[in-house]
C-alpha cells in the first residue's frame, strides 16, 4: 500500500505534443482515484508516467514516499491492467498469472498460494488450465486482474480495463472491482473516458481536459459543484443544460439571468456574459395555463424506463428536462418550465469558471 504524489508533472512527446501540462495530485494510501476525460486528454500518459513506462519531462513522482523519477517500472511496486489485457496467448491462465512471480524468483509454494488466493477472489479457479483464447472477454479481464493481484503491488493502475466488454458485463465487473478494492484496500488509480464508470467507482475523481486537471473531488461534489463549464457538461447524463446569456439588474433591483424567454433569479452573480447551468432533473414542466410568459415546445420525448427525457425548444433555445414517466407529456405539446432555484449553476461567460455566490 502506498500514497502516490505527482508534483508539477509535465510530459511532452517529440514533435511538440504536450500530453500532460502541469499536473499535481495527492493520492492517499488505499484510495480509489479515477482519472476521467475525453479521448486524447492525457489520461493514459499520466498513468504511464506513474508506471514508469514513459519518462517525465519535468516534475516529480513519489510512490510510498519514495521519489521514483529514476526508478525502473519493475522496481516501482505497481501492477498495471490494460484495456487489451495483454495476456500471453501461448500460456495457460495459471502460467500467465505465475509469470511475473517466476521472473522475480518467488518460492514455488508462495506462487501456488498466491495463485490460489487470487483465483478464489476472482472466481476463476476452474479456468486455470485454459488458454486465453478459450476464455470469454469477461474471464480474460478477470485473469488480467488476477495477474496484477498476485503481485501484491503497493498500487494498481488500470487503463480502461472494461472498455472491451459489453454493457452488462461492464456493470458486473465494475461491482467486482469495487468489491476487490474494499477487500484489498490497495491504492488504485483507474483511467476511463466513461463518466458513469468514474462516478460509480471513484472515492475521488480527477477530471482532465487537454493535459490539464480541471477538478479533483468526490463524485457528489463534482456533480453538485462542478468547477467549470467543461466539468459541468462532462459529468452527468443527459448532460447539464448550459445556456449562454447575460445577467442584468432588473428595475426592481433583483439580479436576473436572461436568455430568450428564459429568466432566472441570479442573486449575487455579477452582471455581464454568464452561462447558466441547470441539470435536466432540476427542470420541471407543467402545462401552460395562459399566464406563463415562457413557453417551450416538446420536440421529442425519450422514454428511458422509469423516467423520460423531454427535449424542449423555444426559438433557438434548446434544453432537456428529465421527468417521471407518469407525467405522460406528449411530443408537440406546449409546456412551461420551473427551474429549481437552489440547484442552478452560474459560469463566467468568458472563462467558464464557476461563479461562487452565497445563493448557489
Ligand atoms: N508516444 C507518443 N508520441 C506522441 N504523442 C503521443 C504519444 N502518446 C500519446 N500521445 C499524444 O498525447 C496526447 C494524450 O494521449 P493519451 O494516450 O494520454 O490520451 P488518453 O486521454 O488516454 O486518450 P484515450 O481516451 O483516447 O485513450 C494525445 O494527443 C496523443 O496523441
Ligand atoms: Mg488512453
Image (tube, rainbow, N blue to C red):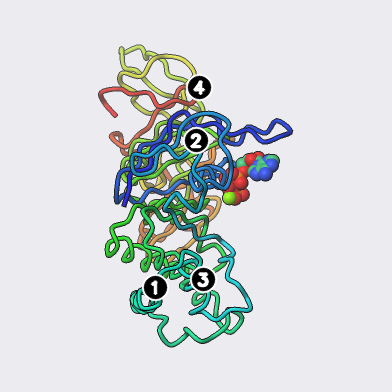
Residue visible at 57% across and 48% down in the picture: 53
Is residue 203 depicted above or below 79 in this figure? Answer: above
* Tag 4 residue: 351
Q: Quadrant of the C terminus?
A: top left
Q: Secondary structure under badge 3?
A: helix
Residue 130, placed above or below residue 272:
below
Which numbered disc covers residue 99? 3
In percent of width and height, residue 196 lies at 44, 55
Under circle 4, the secondary element is loop
Disc 1 from disc 3: Cα separation: 13 Å
Q: Are marks 4 and 3 in contact (CB under 8 Å)?
A: no
Q: Which residue is mark 2?
A: 230
- Residue 25, picture quadrant: top left
Find out if the beta carbon at label 4 lies less than 8 Å from the nearest ligand 1 atom: no
Q: Nearer the viewer, mark 1 or mark 3?
A: 1
Give neighbour class at mark 1: few <14, some 14-19, many 20+ (Cα, 10 Å): few
Say which label, 2 or 1, has the lower sequence index. Answer: 1
Residue 239 percent location from the top left of the image: 47, 46
In primary-sequence order, the first of circles 4 and 1 is 1
Front-lying residue, 224 or 32: 32
Q: Is residue 38 left or right of residue 278?
A: right
When asked about the image quadrant of residue 86, the answer is bottom right
Question: Disc 4 versus disc 2: distance between alpha carbons?
Answer: 10 Å
Disc 1 element? loop
The mark closer to the camera, 2 or 3, is: 3
Q: Closest to the observer: 268 or 153?
A: 153
Using the numbered discs, state the Cα–Cα distance from disc 4 to disc 1 in whole angstroms: 58 Å
* Mark 4 or mark 2, earlier in chain: 2
Amino acid at each position: 500500500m502506498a500514497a502516490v504524489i505527482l508534483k508539477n508533472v509535465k510530459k511532452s512527446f517529440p514533435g511538440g505534443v504536450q500530453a500532460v501540462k502541469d499536473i499535481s495530485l495527492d493520492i492517499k494510501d488505499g484510495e480509489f482515484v479515477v482519472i476521467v476525460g475525453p479521448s486524447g486528454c492525457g489520461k493514459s500518459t499520466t498513468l504511464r508516467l506513474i508506471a514508469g513506462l514513459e519518462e517525465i519531462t519535468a516534475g516529480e513522482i513519489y510512490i510510498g514516499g519514495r521519489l521514483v523519477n529514476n526508478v525502473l517500472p519493475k522496481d516501482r511496486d505497481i501492477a498495471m491492467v490494460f484495456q487489451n489485457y495483454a495476456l500471453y496467448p501461448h500460456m495457460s491462465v495459471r502460467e500467465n498469472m505465475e509469470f511475473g512471480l517466476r521472473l522475480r524468483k518467488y518460492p514455488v509454494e508462495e506462487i501456488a498460494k498466491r495463485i490460489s488466493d487470487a483465483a478464489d477472489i476472482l472466481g476463476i479457479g476452474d479456468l486455470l488450465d485454459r488458454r486465453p483464447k478459450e476464455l470469454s472477454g469477461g474471464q480474460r479481464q478477470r485473469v488480467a486482474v488476477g495477474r496484477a493481484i498476485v503481485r501484491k503491488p503497493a498500487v494498481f493502475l488500470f487503463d480502461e480495463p472494461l472498455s472491451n466488454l459489453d454493457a452488462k458485463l461492464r456493470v458486473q465487473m465494475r461491482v467486482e472491482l469495487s468489491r476487490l478494492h474494499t477487500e484489498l484496500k490497495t491504492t488504485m488509480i483507474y483511467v476511463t473516458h466513461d463518466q458513469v464508470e468514474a462516478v460509480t467507482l471513484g472515492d475521488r475523481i480527477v477530471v482532465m481536459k487537454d493535459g490539464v486537471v480541471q477538478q479533483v473531488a468526490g463524485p457528489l461534489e463534482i456533480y453538485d459543484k462542478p468547477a467549470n463549464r467543461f466539468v459541468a457538461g462532462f459529468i452527468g447524463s443527459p448532460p447539464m443544460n448550459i445556456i449562454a446569456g447575460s445577467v442584468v439588474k432588473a428595475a426592481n433591483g433583483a439580479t436576473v439571468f436572461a436568455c430568450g424567454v428564459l429568466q432566472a433569479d441570479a442573486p449575487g452573480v455579477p452582471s455581464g456574459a454568464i452561462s447558466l447551468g441547470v441539470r435536466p432533473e432540476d427542470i420541471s414542466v407543467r402545462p401552460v395555463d395562459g399566464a406563463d410568459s415562457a413557453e417551450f415546445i416538446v420536440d421529442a420525448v425519450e422514454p428511458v424506463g422509469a423516467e423520460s427525457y423531454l427535449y424542449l425548444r423555444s426559438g433557438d433555445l434548446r434544453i432537456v428536462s428529465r421527468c417521471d414517466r407518469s407525467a405522460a407529456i406528449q411530443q408537440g405539446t406546449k409546456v412551461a418550465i420551473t427551474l429549481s432555484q437552489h440547484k442552478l449553476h452560474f459560469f463566467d461567460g468568458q472563462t467558464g469558471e464557476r461563479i461562487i455566490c452565497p445563493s448557489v
